[in-house]
Image (spheres, helix red, strand yellow):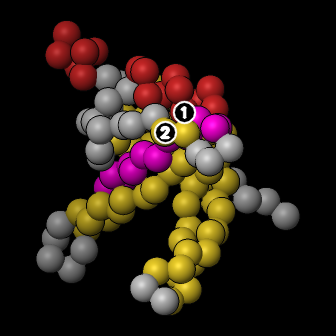
Amino acid sequence: MLNQVVLVGRIVYDLELKKSENLKKYLVLTLAIPRSFKNMEGNYDTDFIRCVAWDNIAENTSLYCHKGDIVGVKGRLQSRNLDKNDKKETVMEVIAEKITFLTSKSTEEKS
């Protein structure tokens, strides 16, 4: 079996490093990834994909990346069950095993 995801996209929100109940550092980032084909109206749709990074990966990403930066994420898909408004809901997210910093605003401004 294989569960591997590779994404390249732009960070949508400002990043905030958090700590879990057992004091592990984690970071939630959402990537905006435009589709490579046009919809029926002739526009490119964009997917927004939730990714979670832990420990050192989370800490380094929060230090060096910001909203608008382009990153590559290699990881795996994971599902999680939530109880929301007395309903059980399953959420799919990417658990980041490696994040590559591809651009930052400071490098784009110098070009």
Residue under the point 23% across and 63% down = 44
Q: Main secondary structure of the magenta part?
A: strand
Task: Locate residue 38, reporting x and y percent.
Answer: 25, 68
Q: Which residue is mark 2?
A: 18
Q: Give the residue drawn at x 16%, y 70%.
A: 42
Residue at image coords 55%, 75% = 82
From the viewer's side, name the closer residue of 22 and 61.
22
Query: Would residue 99 be visible to someone looking at this image?
Result: no
Q: Which mark is residue 40?
A: none
The image quadrant where one finds the C terminus is top left
The CA span between labels 2 and 1 is 9 Å
User: Which label belongs to residue 58?
Assistant: 1
- The kind of residue tagged 2 is Lys
- The boundaries of the magenta stretch are 23-36
In what element is the residue under mark 1? helix
Q: Position of residue 21 (x, y in %)?
A: 62, 48
Query: In front: 38, or 94?
Result: 94
Disc 2 or 1, which lies upstream in sequence? 2
Picture layout, residue 43 above or below residue 16: below
- At horizontal 21% and vertical 80% (from top left) the residue drawn is 40
Position of residue 110 relative to residue 71, above or below, is: above
Residue extending farthest top = 110
State yes or no: residue 16 in magenta: no
